[in-house]
Image: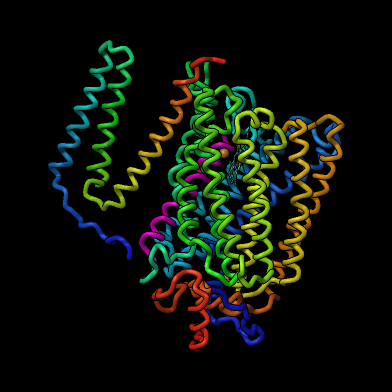
Amino acid sequence: MSTIISLPDQSTATLPKRSYLNSEYGLKSWLLTLDHKRIGILYLIVTLFFFCIGGTMAALIRLNLLTPGGELVAADTYNKLFSIHGIIMVFFFLVPIAPAVLGNFLIPLMIGAKDVAFPRLNLLSWYLFVTGGCFELYAIIWGGMDTGWTFTTPLSTHYVNTHVVSAALGIFVAGFSSILTGVNFIVTIHRLRAPGMTWFRMPLFIWSYYATSILFVLATPVIAITLVLIVLERVIGIGVFDPAKGGDPLLFQHLFWFYSHPAVYVMILPGMGVISEVVACFSRKRVFGYTAVAFSSVAIAVFSFFVWAHHMFIMGISNYSALVFSLMTMLVAVPSAIKIFNWSSTMYKGSITFDTPMLYSFSFIGLFTIGGMTGVMLASLGMDIHLTETYFVVAHFHYVMVGGMVSAVMAGLHFWWPKITGRMYPEPLGRLAAAILFIGFNLTFFPQFIVGYLGMPRRYHSYPPEFQVLNVLSTAGASVLAIGYLLPAVYLLWSMKYGKIAGANPWQAPGLEWQVQSPPLTENFPEPPVVDFEAYDFEWLANHTKSEVQTVG
Amino acid sequence: MSEPTHHAHTVVHPKVYAAVFGALLLFTALTVFASSLELGVFNAVVALAIAVIKATLVVLFFMHIRYSSKLLKLTICSGVFMFLVLITMTLTDYISRAWGLW
Ligand code: HEM
Ligand SMILES: [Cu+2]
């Protein structure tokens, strides 16, 4: 069933007098806030700061690869560039951005709660994150690290003399911020749902954030301990990973990937939640197969713990074990495929509008599918021997992480921007940026599939001249991408002051968060909401708006 | 609707804590004693078994899980389960690494 979208008249909308943004003023009111919405914004500022650092490193990497000789930077410097890029982008941007920013802001609003279950813990996790970030900045400024984001032993423990210790400790500290956020979300979703908000009335966004939180809580302690072991190995030589002392370097790989594979799903599941909301809203239809999508999130979370050794196929692990892990890896692609199928079916016969968030969702669906399918290619043992440690792998994970997750983050940011700030971003520029990002992304990373397949290894600062054409294409794409990111940065900042006033529900979406004023009150709901409708119930919304007198705080 | 929000606050008698504390000390002594025996590979097995029992006692009594809701028990179990996954799946590699080398 579908209803035609008819956006409310925004020329008459006014900004509410009182909201979480103007309830208190001053730096202190932000740094000591317990409001989940403000904490979300604090996270947004810090993660975007790290995104700029990571992005700068990426630009330098691509510039260096413009010429086969690697004339721009020395080999050592190049190693540091990609290590900083990877560590910052994974641990300080992509892992926190969706859960800690969008999750913090939206979970209580979507389930009809006043705040998260433990507001103080929430603030503490932001401070832990910032502390971890400071360690990382220290490591970078005082000379950087060159282990790659994977901290491979024995390289990281025996052979490099860069700032591995502070880099590892930074991730250790920031890891606790992830764990606390995860605990907080789990308890919030269990305990603070509004009356009537049953598990199967929750938006799919909440399901995917619930799955993400499980991953946070169960996987992050392992990386924390593993990095401490690295530090101890370097500092006092305890020998867990040192064959000379009876240790095993592969043990490090097992421990590291036991976290890091689930972590790649931390970096995609929240995105999937965003896409469910956006696709439903801009198709004016309930998500097709709600339960299947909900359970596929949980299935992804559970199965992702059984596949980690696909990162170790060429490292000399047992062939039998590799077979099992290869099979499991192919199976874990199934729940993701279910989601893609269901979003496509949601759009089928929906009344689709092509606003910016929806354009980003299209990017997500296409690019994530390519990324996922190449993942299945890498999961097959024979193929992986040819492709591992080449640019093919680099292209694979950028398709899922940047093409998938960053697109989803952009979709979410634009979709909820009116809720967060009370103002609209300029729609034409939004669409333009989405198009630029799509083109720039493919131009950057598709050539990397080819050049990787042809045999160009990753993590080298120079390459044979016959690969130059593809590398130049890729660098050209990276400059398009840069424009694509700068443009939203500019117009989003601009819109905070000059954007059109959005009104409570600019997209005519049925979620609870859209039934309150934008920006919301500090306490979110003037009175506790009672939920008597299913998720994505556009009929309910249509009746509701007809018979309602709008009340604004 | 959601699960019952508050589990009954059972008052645990100090005697229980004392007994658990005593048991923990006893097991510690046992660990030390067992390490002086010559059991081959079983030295590690015995030491680990004792450690697991001690940890279980701490979780059940000192951390009050014995008196907590099913949901909290499930939470603890999921952590243990994931830990077992980590160990067993890693062991599949170590155990079969030398099989039929080709
Ligand atoms: C959809 C199913 C997926 C499958 C079957 C899959 C499979 C694989 C395999 C087999 C590898 C190892 C390649 C090698 O090093 O030889 C790999 C690497 C990687 N994948 Fe995926 N993947 C999937 C989804 C994802 C997602 C959703 C993400 C992140 C959002 C992701 C991020 C990564 C990263 C970061 C690496 C490289 C790690 C490194 O060595 O630096 N993958 N993937
Ligand atoms: Cu993986």
Q: Position of residue A82 (x, y in %)?
A: 70, 38
Left or right: residue A276 versus residue A361 is: left
Image: A168 above or below A321: below
Could one spot residue A312 in this view of the protein?
Answer: yes
- Image quarter for ligand 1 equals top right
Q: Quadrant of residue A411?
A: bottom right
**Which residue is pictured at 50% across the width and 19% down the height?**
B97
Whether residue A349 is in magenta: the answer is: no
**Which residue is pictured at 73% across the width and 57% down the height?**
A485
Magenta region, residue range? A165-193
**Which residue is pictured at 16% across the width and 48% down the height?**
B12
Left or right: residue A206 versus residue A187 is: right
Q: Position of residue A527 (x, y in %)?
A: 40, 78
As drawn, the residue found furthest toward the front would be A349
Left or right: residue A439 versus residue A533 is: right
Q: Position of residue A377 (x, y in %)?
A: 64, 38
**Which residue is pictured at 51% across the width and 21% down the height?**
A248
Magenta stretch: dominant SS?
A: helix
Instruction: Specify the quadrant that holds the N terminus of chain A.
Output: bottom right
Could one spot residue A101 in this view of the protein?
Answer: no
Q: In the image shown, does A475 or A310 lie closer to the viewer?
A: A310
Q: Position of residue A498 (x, y in %)?
A: 70, 76
How many badges with numbers are in the image? 0
Image: A319 above or below A467: above
